[in-house]
Amino acid sequence: MSLLDLVRSDLRDFGGYGSARKTGLKGSVWLNANESPWASPADPGQALNRYPEPQPEALKTRLAALYGVSEDSVLMTRGSDEGIDLLTRALCRAEHDAILVSPPTFGMYAVCARVQAAFVVTVPLIDTGKAFRLDVDSVLRTLELSVAKAPIKIIYVCSPANPTGAAVVLSEIERLLVGVAGRAIVVVDEAYAEYSDHPSALTLRERFDFLVVFRTLSKAYALAGARLGITLADPALIRVLNAIAPPYPLAQPAVALALDAVSESAADEAQRRAGRIAAERERVAAALSRLSGVLSVYASDANYVLVRFFDAEAAFQGLLSAGVVVRDQRAQPGLGNALRITIGSIEENDALLSALNALETIRA
Ligand SMILES: Cc1ncc(COP(=O)(O)O)c(C=O)c1O
C-alpha cells in the first residue's frame, strides 16, 4: 500500500488553484495579480500591496534546518489548526472515513472531522492516577476491527498530550507505527515538544512515510498571535496538502516575524525559556499538590498541569473572581473534576497559588 492510497482518490492528482504567485514567472513589471501599484500609507515598508509567497522559501529553509528535515517535507499553515483541517479534508471522504483519537485530547481533531463529516472513533487514554498513557494495544485492535464502511484514515497521538500533559515515549510511538504498518496516517502532534525532555517523533520520520508530525510557533516560540504552524510529512503528502490549501495562507507580516523568531539565537532563547517554564511547572505542581482542596496533579511534560479538585467548580469560580482564568476540563470524558492550568511567569503563578490558598483559608 502506498502513502497516496490513503489520500482521497479525487484529490490525488489535484493541482489546486494556480495562483499568480505559483506560476514562477520572472519579471520587473507585475501586472498579473490585479494588485495596487502603490503600497498602503499604513504599510511599514513590507510591500504589502503584493500577494505573499504561498510557501515562503526563506522560512521554509530555516524551519527545515530547525527540525532536521528536507525542505520538501515542510508545509507552513495558519497555525497547526489549519494543518489538522487540511489533513482531514485530504484523507477523509465525507460520511465514509474515520479518524481515531484518544480522549481526553485536543478538541480540534474531532472538530475538523465533524466539519468534514468524517466519523470519530475513540480509544480513551489510560488513567494511572499519576499520568495518562496512550493505549497502543487498543488503538491497534481498533484499527484491526475498523470496517470497510468506515475505515480509519488518521490516528492522532498528542505528545506531550493536551490536556493531560504526558509525553508518549518514543518506543511506544514506534510500536504503534510498526503495528499500523501504513494502513492509516499516524499524526504525532508535538505542539508542546520544546517543554519536554522526550526525544521528538521526528527522529522516526525517515523510516515511516505515513508518519506526520505537527509543530507550532504558538507555544515555546511565543507567536500564537502570528498563526504559524508546521506540518512535517512525506513530500508526496505535502504536495497534496499544498494543493488544497488556500492560495495565500500566510500573511507577509507574520512570515517576517516568524523568520526572526526562529533564527538560531532566537531559537536558543525559546529553548531556554521553555526550560524556565518546565522548572516553574515543577514548582507550581509541588505547591498545588500540598493544597488540601487538590486531589491530584498529573505529571506533565508541557507548559500546563492538569489538576483534579475536590470541588472544581469552587476552584474555577474562586480563581475567576480573583481574576485568574484557567481552562475548565470538566466536559472532557473522565475529567469531571479537573482544570488545566497554564504555567505563566513566576508572578502569574504566584497569583494563581495565592488565590487558591485564599480559597482554602475561607473553607477552613
Ligand atoms: C495539541 C495542540 N495541537 C495544536 C494546537 C493548535 O496550535 P496552533 O496555534 O498552531 O494552531 C494546540 C493549541 O492549543 C494544541 O494544544
Image: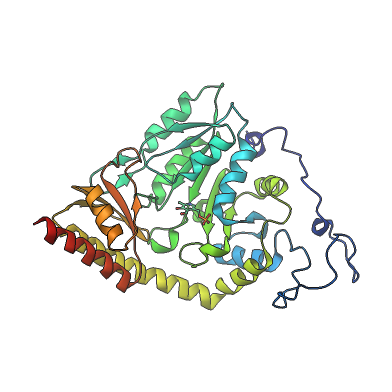
Q: Is residue 103 left or right of residue 37?
A: left
- Image quadrant in which you'd find residue 86: top right
Identify which residue, 152 or 260, lies in the foreground. Answer: 260
Residue at the (14%, 58%) spot, across then down? 360
Q: Is residue 341 left or right of residue 95?
A: left
Q: Position of residue 327 (x, y in %)?
A: 36, 53
Q: Is residue 334 left or right of residue 23?
A: left
Residue 195 in view:
yes
Q: Position of residue 77 (x, y in %)?
A: 62, 55
Work out whether 140 lies above or below 358. Answer: above
Identify which residue, 82 or 76, lies in the foreground. Answer: 82
Work out whether 342 lies above or below 204. Answer: below
Q: Quadrant of the C terminus?
A: bottom left
Q: Is residue 13 left or right of residue 280?
A: right
Q: Position of residue 44 (x, y in %)?
A: 69, 77
- The coloring applied to the image is rainbow
Residue at the (34%, 37%) spot, across then down? 333
